[in-house]
Each structure stands twice: as structure tokens, then as C-alpha cells.
Amino acid sequence: MTLLQVRGIETHIGQYHILQGVTFEVVPGEITVLLGRNGAGKTTTLRSIMGLNPVSKGEISFQGERVEALPTHRISRQGIGYVPEDQGIFPDLTVGETMRIAMRLNDDHTKARLEWVLELFPDLHKFWGRKSGLLSGGQKQMLAISRAYVNDNRLLLIDEPSKGLAPIMVEKLMLAIEQMKAKTTVLLVEQNFMMASRIGHRYYLMDEGRIVSEGMMAELQQDEATRRKYLGIA
Amino acid sequence: MNGIINLLVNGLATGMLIFLLASGLTLIFGLMSVLNFAHGGLFAWGAYGGVWLYAATGSFFVAILGAVVIGMLLGLVLERLVIRPVYGNHIQQILVTLGAMLVLSELLKVVFGPNPLKADVPPLLNGSWEVEGVILIKYRLFIICIGAIVFAGLLFVLKRTKIGLIVRAGVMNPEMVQALGIPIRRVFTLVFMAGAGLAALGGALLAPYSGVIFAEMGMQFAILAFIVVVIGGMGSIQGSAFAALLVGLSGAFMAYYVPELSLAANMLLMVIVLLIKPSGLFGAKG
Ligand SMILES: Nc1ncnc2c1ncn2[C@@H]1O[C@H](COP(=O)(O)OP(=O)(O)O)[C@@H](O)[C@H]1O
Ligand SMILES: [Mg+2]
């Protein structure tokens, strides 16, 4: 049973044909990693799933239901949390206000999730009343992840959480994402192959708007040639 | 002493009317960063709508309510057709909303004729009470009450409810708010409609107060409202309320004691405030 199924999606931005037939699936309970060098189309793939860059062709099914024609807010409400590449912080709102907006319900279950994530990221608890714009880069990332996690989402789309962060912070975030795996499913975009390979189960490798390689993470770790070709790393 | 109390009531009543007009403006600007120069047109439509509905139904309550509905519907059309394409661009907003303002004023003349209309105070609110030798005009007290209720209601919605936060977040990053499951376009439309409804409410209440209404009244009051919004600090409801009362009171007292200066008083007030605090009295950003 797959949670998310993406079948042959094509996405245009303006006159550019960015995604040229992308097919992959996300299995529940796993961390699926979308790899690929800069400009491969990873962010556009996530944005297409969220309806922010609507697809012109292909199908996206989430929990068996077609979502590619829905508006973004409806897609989100199907149970998909989104952490954008630029974190999408609301600079003038405090951490607390941000979480208040994010929480669709105020029931015990959601409150418990909030508590759990605040334990995971004590910084957010500490800076609850601080304007989000004044947080450090790592704290902003924690906030963005918590905001996506706090609702009972079945799937989190996380776009390059390690970008621009110090190694210690990256380590912390990866550990956190790994812990979230127990409660939700993650589709992770990551350039940091070391990190991705440590927490990811399955990978899809993108290049020029297409999936060029896929399989279990462990396989890619053995496959130096593919890594060298598409990621430029050995 | 009695004279002073009278001036006080007059000043407060005028101030509250200005506040109603300015609050819609500051709501739309403060939350959505939209400069809406068509606001005065909505105000005038509220006045005409109220007068017409009062004549047609004989119920002042229906007239006020109807005027607010007219304002909100016009707000809906305005937001969809005129504002939506220019979110985030102040220069274009000024141009298109000024255009919309002219259209609204001209349409008033088409619908209601070019001549000024007379507006009556409803019997229930007509006349005055005399308390210890002080004459309290009922309609003015009524305006003060409505203004206070609207003020409290607005503050509550913005500070205590999630909707205020959502709109603020939506201004900063609409995509992200949608990705959180919130239909932000619809929220923006609602805010705009609320602001337009407030303008129309102000117009409908003003009509019996001034006794006569005319198509260009919108422009005249819009300027006053802008002065108030600027003095109070763009986007601050408390600031608008404070500044509106200040303008209303200073207007009343100046007209009584130094009538020669009363016309210039508001501009003077604005200049002084802006010189001392360029962001306005309650403005956050410098
Ligand atoms: N708004 C846009 N306008 C034009 N081209 C874009 C836009 N966004 C992305 N692209 C192009 O689409 C391609 C894929 O971008 P993106 O999905 O951001 O890649 P990745 O996330 O893998 O680095 C790149 O070539 C990029 O230049
Ligand atoms: Mg990217």
C-alpha cells in the first residue's frame, strides 16, 4: 500500500517545461529521499504535490485519492504538511502565534503533538514569545518542521532542511526527522547525501526534471558510479 | 461648563464617525497592506443606501444593516475586480482605487440623481435629553455607543482570534498559509468586505447626523479618514480610534473658540504628529 503515488507528472513554470514526467511513490512509515543536484527539479516536485506549481499532465494520488487538481489548502487538509526550501517563516509572528495558526484543531491529540515537538525542539519552547524573524537559521527550520508536524498529517514534505546550517544543527534536525518517522511519513529532499543516506530508506534520484535512478538507500551507497554521475560525489 | 460638555459630546460623536470610516481603511491597510482610495466611495454608498432604505422600509435598523450589506457587496466586487490584481503594489493600488472612487461617485449620481438628498434622524433617536441643564442630543450619543462597540469588536477579533493572525501571516507569505490548509484568498476577500462594511456603516450613520448627503461627500471624508489613519499610525486600530477622537474633539473645540483655525487644525495636527513621530502615534515601524 503506497501513501503517495506520483505518476508521470509534468510541470511548466511560465514557458519552461520543468518536470518532464516524474514518477515515484512514498511508502508509509518510511523516509523517502529525493536526491539530485541543484536545479534537478526537486523543489518543483514538492511544490507540484502541494499544488503550488500545478501540474499540466500526470496524476498524484494521496491515500488513494486524486489530488493534483485540488487547490493548495485542500491538498494540505488531506493530511500533507509542507516545509518549504526557504522555510516560509512569518517573520512578524511569534513562535507561539505561528503554531496557533498551524494547529487546525485544538483537541488533546493536537496539543499532545505540540508538546512532543516542543520536547524535541526545546528552543521553540524557550523562544515561544519571540518573533520568528529573530530566530537563528536552525531555529527557523525547527519552527517550520514543527508547524508542518503539529497537525495529524500522514505525510511531511521537507525541502532541504540542512541548507545553510552548521553541521551540528544538521545532525540535530536529522535526528529529529528520524524520530518523527515513528509518527508520520516523510518525503525528504536533501543534497547532503551523508545525512540522507543515514536516515533514508528509499531514494529517487532526479536529473533535469526526470527520475533517473531509484531504489533502496543501501543500494545507492554501494553504487559509486551513479552517485558520481548525478550527485558529483564519491 | 455645560457648553464644554456639549462640545465634548459633539466632538466625540464626530470623532466616532471618523473612526468608523478610518477603521475600515486601517484594517485594509494594516492587515493587507492595500491602500484603498475608493474607501470614501464606499462611505458615500453607505450614506445613500441608508437614506434610500430608510425611506423605503421606514426602519432605521434595516437601513443601517442594509447599508452595511451594500458596502460589503461593493467591497466584494471591488476586491475581486480591482484589488486582486494589484496586491503588493502600492502605486497601482492608488491608481486603480482612485479610479474606482470616481466610478463609485458617478454611479451614485446615476442611481440617485445628481442633487443632494435630505437625511432624517429616526424618531426614536430624535431630540435630546436634558440632564442637570446639559442638553444631550440622542443621535450623537447613539453614534458614540456604536463607535465604542465597533472599536471593542475589532480589537477583539484582531487580538483574540485566530483570524487576525491568519490574515497577518497571509500578508507575509500567502503560499505558506495556503500550505497550512487555509484558503487565504477567501480570507482576504472577507477582510476587504469587512473594511468596506465599516465604511458604509460610517456613511449610513453620518447621513442623519449631517442632514444632507451628496455624491462627493466620500472624497471629503476620505481625506479626513486618511489624516486620522496617518496620525494614529497605519494599521493600528487603537491609533485610529485615538486619532479620530482627537480630530473630532479638536474640531469641535476649535470651531467654538478659534473658528478661523478650525479648518487648518487637522492638517496642523497631522504635521505636528508626523514631525515628532513619523510612524504615527501608535505606529510600530519607523
Ligand atoms: N519560478 C521559476 N521560473 C523559472 N524557472 C524556474 C522557476 N523555479 C524553478 N525554475 C527552474 O526549474 C528547475 C528546477 O528547479 P528546482 O525545482 O528548484 O530544482 P532543485 O530544487 O532540484 O534545485 C531549475 O532549472 C530552475 O532554474
Ligand atoms: Mg530546491
Image (cartoon, rainbow, N blue to C red):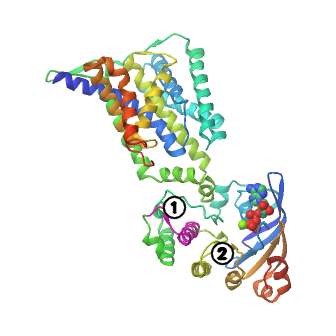
Q: Nearer the viewer, residue B83 or B281?
A: B281
The type of residue carrying mark 2 is Thr
Dominant secondary structure of the residues highlighted in magenta in the image: helix
Q: Is residue A137 magenta?
A: yes
Residue A225 left/right relative to A78: right
Nearer the observer, disc 2 or disc 1? Answer: 1
Magenta region, residue range? A130-148
Q: Position of residue A44 (x, y in %)?
A: 75, 62
Q: Position of residue B26 (x, y in %)?
A: 47, 39
The type of residue carrying mark 1 is Gly
Crowd tier of the residue under label 1, counting other residues whose Cα lies within 10 Å: few below 14, some 14–19, many 20 or above: some
| Residue drawn at the location 67% of the way across and 79% of the way down | A29
| Residue drawn at the location 54% of the way across and 39% of the way down | B192
User: Which chain contains the residue that carries disc 2?
Assistant: A
Q: Is residue A91 visible?
A: yes
Furthest-left residue in view?
B132
Q: Which mark is residue A185?
A: 2
Q: Is residue B163 magenta?
A: no
Q: Is residue A68 visible?
A: no
Q: Position of residue B239 (x, y in %)?
A: 38, 41
Crowd tier of the residue under label 2, counting other residues whose Cα lies within 10 Å: few below 14, some 14–19, many 20 or above: many
Q: Determine the CA span between mark 2 and mark 1.
A: 28 Å
Q: How many marks?
A: 2
User: Which chain contains the residue that carries disc 1?
Assistant: A
Q: On the image, numbered disc 1 is attached to which residue?
A: A133
| Residue drawn at the location 29% of the way across and 23% of the way down | B254
